[in-house]
Image: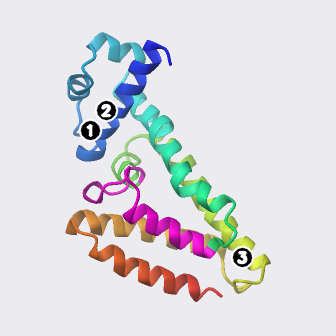
Amino acid sequence: MSKASNTRHTILEKAFDLIYKKGYQTTSIDEIIATTKVTKGAFYYHFKTKDEMGIAIINEIVKPIMKKDFIIPLKNAEKPMEEIYLMTKSLLFENSFLKLEYGCPAGNLTQEMTPWNSEFTNALNELIVEWQSTIENCIKKEIENGNIRSTVKPKQVAYFVISGYWGIRNFGKIYNNTDCYHAYLEELKSYLANLA
């Protein structure tokens, strides 16, 4: 990695950490510059605006991690229903990138930025649609294999799983403990079993 690309990546990582903890709109460029210890000139060499940097954070930090942890485990799952549950459990309890007190970064950015910025909406939409379609494909595969009732609607299941995950992340933030995660996972397991 060249010095310039290393500096760019450092800016994105440190800015992501700040934004994940504080929110996008309350994090200033000056705070990002102070945290990354780069000059203002170096920041503006890599990003013309804060929003350009924000889109880069989604595309270069959030998307790769979400693909690795949210999407790839489901793509080639031999037991898709079990994998949806295990993926969710892992995201809630085992993933070092995701913090209880800060929630889901993609969910946070969606809530905070999509009403105000169409570029954020497009970048986040691309990511969420991929996650949603991956879950839908898991459900379709299970229907084809005869493991789920043919009347089950894959899109509705995907909406339920994703909205449940985002919702319980918010409860975790509010309560600042994982008790609610256990209750949610128990209900998710029951829901998935009832699709058979």
> Who's the residue at 50% across and 87% down the image?
190
The residue that appears at 58% across and 69% down in the rendered structure is 83
Q: Which mark is residue 18?
A: 1
Amino acid type, callout 1: Leu
What amino acid is labelled 3 in the image? Glu
Measure the alpha-carbon separation of dots 3 and 2. Answer: 41 Å
Could you tell me which quadrant the C terminus lies in? bottom right
How far, Cα to Cα, is label 3 from label 1? 41 Å
Q: Position of residue 155 (x, y in %)?
A: 62, 70
Categorize mark 3 by other alpha carbons within 10 Å: few (<14), some (14-19), many (20+).
many
Q: Is residue 97 magenta?
A: yes
Which tag, 3 or 2, sits closer to the chain's start? 2
x 41%, y 47%: residue: 114
- Give the residue pinned by disc 3: 142
Find numbered disc 2 in the image and state the secondary structure of the residue it sits on: helix
Query: What numbered label is drawn on residue 14?
Result: 2
Q: Specify the segment rendered in magenta.
A: 81-106
Overall secondary structure of the magenta stretch? helix
Q: Are marks 2 and 1 in contact (CB under 8 Å)?
A: yes
Q: Nearer the viewer, residue 96 or 150?
A: 96
